[in-house]
């Protein structure tokens, strides 16, 4: 009986330990490393070259080396990159927070340019990279690649990584550049979904007008449905919170509803094969415009910081993950016999990325400038260089797509695929570290402090100056726009500009529509009556 | 070439869609259901019988039925309960938040009673349930069960579910009962870990003094190391934030560090085979005592609500999950041919749970009362009945343990195991719904409003009255204790009691030690100097 008992329980315990022991170990390692990155990133804050993402990447690389050494190459599967983890859990909070904290005016004022970059620009870049890869790699002996692989290379490397952009461009310092490059990164996610669908559906060898029109129609359909889904999710949350909760607010429920509704829109978009990134970005914008104003003061502070924190943790984790995974032995052993060729492939890809981006940034900026009459509003050549440079980084999205195309469940067995995986990793590491490190100094060089201020005051003249936005984050979203409106009323020049420029008049009519129909239904700043004894009053009293 | 391309890409897309399509669907369903639970739970808030957990359980059951009907029994594996998901992701935020928001004074004042309940009480209950099951089930024909299975039944059903307790007892209304029953739930997690280890290590058939002493030593070791790990994690976070961040705070980094350090302690405890629940609970207590006072005002609001929200989402998800999983067809088809026997097994288990708990609550309360001289401080018989009743619920912890013991990766093939799994689910559903629903009315019946207030004022005379704690959550943690100190100084009776009662004098010396050594190093209320232009000032200005 005692033996029975012993074996039964030891079986149980063995099962307990094997089933999740590996995941417990890797969770421990990653959580400890993220803590280390946060502390080190903070200590290096004064350093103008470093930031948390590069710290995370380097720490990840070092950890990868240590793990390989300790496990002697056996344990290389713990750290294998998982696309599910990336697309389902890591990406949504980052993009949602970007939408939630984005300066909406700046974003919508440059909407046409952003769309041009994200849709047409990505397409140009895709064609150039695909053709270039076809041209160069055919001559090199790197294993068999099908035509689909070349097109996939184009799709993988034509998309700017919006997460990297968030890290190197500062919304407060260079708002115009931030909104252009980051907005482009969001829109070209939709483009790449359309590209993948198009490659599947259409006969690309015989392109004619109808196919091109179908392609354009497809893009417009996808863009509109994704945006609409995000907006409907945001409005629904605003409506529910306004109708149900008002008068008897519960912070925890409000915050939970906002998080869950935002995540639901993303997952619904993924389910319906729409662009989840676009959906959750617009959901963030709508939530910050309506829902955020319907909740209690504590919920506002909480959501503001909780979303930023979640996004921050996800970003650090992502770079750490990419760094740790980069040195996975299996994929490197196929290319280790020909290091020269591997470097060649990576260099060609990097070159194509540089050329592909230059081929649309400068022409499209030229076209965009043609449409603007005022000299002040044109994008200067120096700014064009920064737009070109800041969008060069390729990040985790590229790695995820590369794994998806060139591996089966994370393992690389074919020679050609191994080359492309390792080259993708090389390009990502190189572009993030080198281009990322050089972006800040480049901006300082091309746009010294004085002209940066000039740029800002010219391009977003009616946006409030927010030098302390890091210190007083509450100001940047709601209260800011109030100052803005007052400024518009007091300055006739702004008012005149508002009527002459087409984007501005769109904005003007939107404001009228918003005030007359949207805000009375969905709430928003100024449309939620002040209640005596509301959280504002209470919290002030409590602290005094 | 066109065909090559088409097949390549369609392969890619097929892979993309199958790899995570199922998980995308189930995430969508669960997120939408959690939203529904929150809204419905809010609408039913006025109802004294219902709460979010029972709503979630019922909605989960309905969803389970709908899914089975729609998928015609094929799709029953999407919703299979996963212990990893439960222990790694769902449980830690709930227990951490409980520690973070617990009334520390009340908890430590009843510490000895809580330990008695959690350690000795659980052991008594374990023995009674194991022996009872052995006695009854041997006579019934429910398949082969080994002796280890009977002991496991004892371990599974002797542990109170702390998550359920959180739902039915209110910390503000019945603080003494809450801290006793909930504290017991936390401590008996450690007991059950020790029990499982003991069953494995020791020859339980020949129990002698040495084995018993080893068992006691093992429990003390596990309790101390788990507590220490949690405390060290909390203190480390306090020290890092105090040393590194002071003067140049960053809310996102502070919040991220607190979340990650807390989670790290839990995962480390799991890695080292300690009691993760105990660790993360004490980490929460330490963090609310030190770390919370070192961060900015926005971080305080954010952590307070973000932890509560995470815990809230996890709780709703858990009940939903248990409800959805309960009707999984596979396990029911083995017992459907003998429904009477299944009901018999469940009834016996329920009866054993009732008897097992009664067998230690009343005797231990009697012993606890013997040690107290003042009539006012004794636990009345009515309170004993509520302690007995409120701890009867068995929840997700029981289900997770039952799956762990009686299934291999979630599937039930053996007849005896199927009986025990279905009975566990029946006991959990019945105890949560019936006992849970009746707890509030029972408290109202046994302790009418006036005597409830009496109980409170007697048992925690120096705790500040916090009738508005739901409305002003910031008050309940930090500011509260300040009032408390002032009261102690002004009322000589409290001061005298503090010196006469042993627990109180421990508390007194702890306060002295805390003020002299701990707070100067780790921060805490009153030991973080006020900085002009600090977040308090800024946020007040920003809102005016």
Image (cartoon, coloured by chain):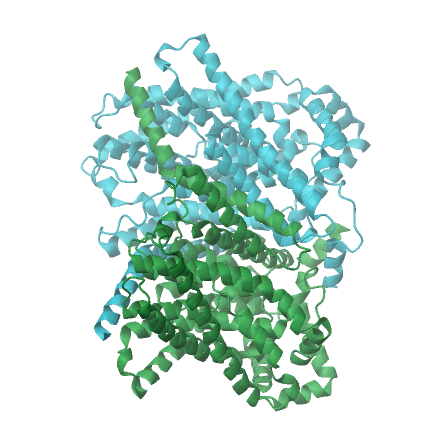
Chain colours: A green, B cyan
Q: Kindly tell me whether residue A44 is visible in this rendering.
A: yes
Could you tell me which quadrant the C terminus of chain B lies in? bottom right
Q: Kindly tell me whether residue A529 is visible in this rendering.
A: no
Q: Nearer the viewer, residue B86 or A466?
A: A466
Q: Nearer the viewer, residue B390 or A270?
A: A270
Residue A495 in the image: state x and y as whole percent. Answer: 68, 87
Query: What residue lies at 34% left-to-right and 84% top-to-bottom?
Result: A212
Residue B169 in the image: state x and y as whole percent. Answer: 53, 38
Query: What residue lies at 21% left-to-right and 28% top-to-bottom?
Result: B143
Q: Nearer the viewer, residue B76 or B290?
A: B290
Q: Nearer the viewer, residue A359 or B416?
A: A359
- In the displayed orientation, state which residue is furthest to the top: B209
* Up-down relation of residue B7 to residue B522 (above or below): below
Q: How many marks?
A: 0
Query: What residue lies at 22% left-to-right and 28% top-to-bottom?
Result: B142
* Up-down relation of residue B57 to residue A335 (above or below): above
* Up-down relation of residue B266 to residue B142 (above or below): below
Query: What residue lies at 32% left-to-right and 59% top-to-bottom?
Result: A417
- In the displayed orientation, state which residue is furthest to the left: B337
Q: Quadrant of residue B153?
A: top left
Could you tell me which quadrant the N terminus of chain B lies in? bottom left
Residue B136 in the image: state x and y as whole percent. Answer: 28, 22
Residue B312 in the image: state x and y as whole percent. Answer: 51, 48
């Amino acid at each position: 009986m005692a033996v029975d008992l012993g074996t039964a329980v030891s079986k149980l315990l063995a099962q307990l330990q094997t089933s999740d022991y590996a995941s417990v170990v890797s969770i421990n390692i990653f959580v400890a490393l993220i803590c280390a990155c946060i502390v080190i990133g903070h200590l290096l804050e004064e350093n103008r070259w470093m930031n948390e993402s590069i710290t995370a990447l380097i720490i990840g690389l070092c950890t990868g080396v240590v793990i390989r050494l300790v496990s002697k190459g056996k344990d290389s599967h713990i750290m294998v990159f998982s696309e599910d983890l990336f697309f389902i859990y890591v990406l949504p909070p980052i993009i949602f927070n970007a939408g939630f904290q984005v300066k909406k005016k700046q974003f919508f004022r440059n909407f046409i340019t952003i769309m041009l970059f994200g849709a047409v620009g990505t397409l140009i870049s895709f064609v150039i990279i695909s053709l270039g890869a076809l041209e160069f790699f055919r001559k090199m002996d790197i294993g068999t690649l099908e035509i689909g692989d070349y097109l996939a290379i184009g799709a993988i490397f034509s998309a700017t990584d919006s997460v990297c952009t968030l890290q190197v461009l500062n919304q407060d310092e260079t708002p115009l550049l931030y909104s252009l490059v980051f907005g482009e990164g969001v829109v070209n996610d939709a483009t790449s979904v359309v590209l993948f669908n198009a490659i599947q559906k259409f006969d690309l060898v015989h392109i004619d007008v109808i196919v091109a029109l179908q392609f354009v129609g497809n893009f417009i359909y996808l863009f509109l449905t994704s945006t609409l889904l995000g907006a409907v999710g945001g409005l629904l949350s605003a409506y529910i919170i306004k109708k149900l909760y008002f008068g008897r607010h519960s912070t925890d429920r409000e915050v939970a509803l906002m998080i869950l509704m935002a995540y639901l829109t993303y997952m619904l978009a993924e389910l319906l094969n729409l662009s989840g990134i676009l959906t959750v970005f617009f959901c963030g914008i709508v939530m910050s415009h309506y829902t955020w104003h319907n909740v209690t003061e504590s919920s506002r502070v909480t959501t503001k910081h909780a979303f930023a924190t979640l996004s921050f943790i996800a970003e650090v984790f992502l770079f750490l993950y990419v760094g740790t995974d980069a040195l996975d032995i299996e994929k490197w052993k196929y290319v280790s016999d020909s290091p020269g060729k591997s470097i060649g492939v990576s260099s060609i890809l990097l070159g194509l990325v540089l050329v592909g981006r230059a081929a649309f940034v400068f022409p499209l900026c030229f076209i965009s400038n043609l449409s603007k009459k005022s000299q002040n509003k044109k994008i200067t050549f120096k700014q064009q260089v920064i737009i070109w440079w800041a969008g060069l980084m390729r990040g985790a999205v590229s790695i995820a797509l590369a794994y998806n195309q060139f591996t089966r469940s994370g393992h690389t067995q074919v020679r050609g695929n191994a080359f492309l995986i390792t080259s993708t990793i090389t390009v990502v590491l190189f572009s993030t570290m080198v281009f990322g490190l050089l972006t800040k100094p480049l901006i300082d060089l091309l746009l010294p402090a004085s002209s940066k201020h000039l740029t800002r005051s010219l391009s977003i003249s009616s946006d409030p100056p927010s030098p302390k936005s890091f210190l007083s984050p509450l100001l940047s979203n709601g209260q800011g726009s109030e100052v803005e409106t007052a400024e518009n009323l007091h300055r006739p020049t702004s008012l005149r500009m508002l009527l002459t420029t087409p984007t501005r008049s769109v904005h003007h009519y939107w404001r009228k529509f918003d005030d007359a129909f949207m805000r009375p239904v969905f709430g928003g700043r100024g449309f939620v009556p002040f209640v005596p004894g509301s959280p504002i009053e209470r919290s002030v009293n409590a602290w005094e």
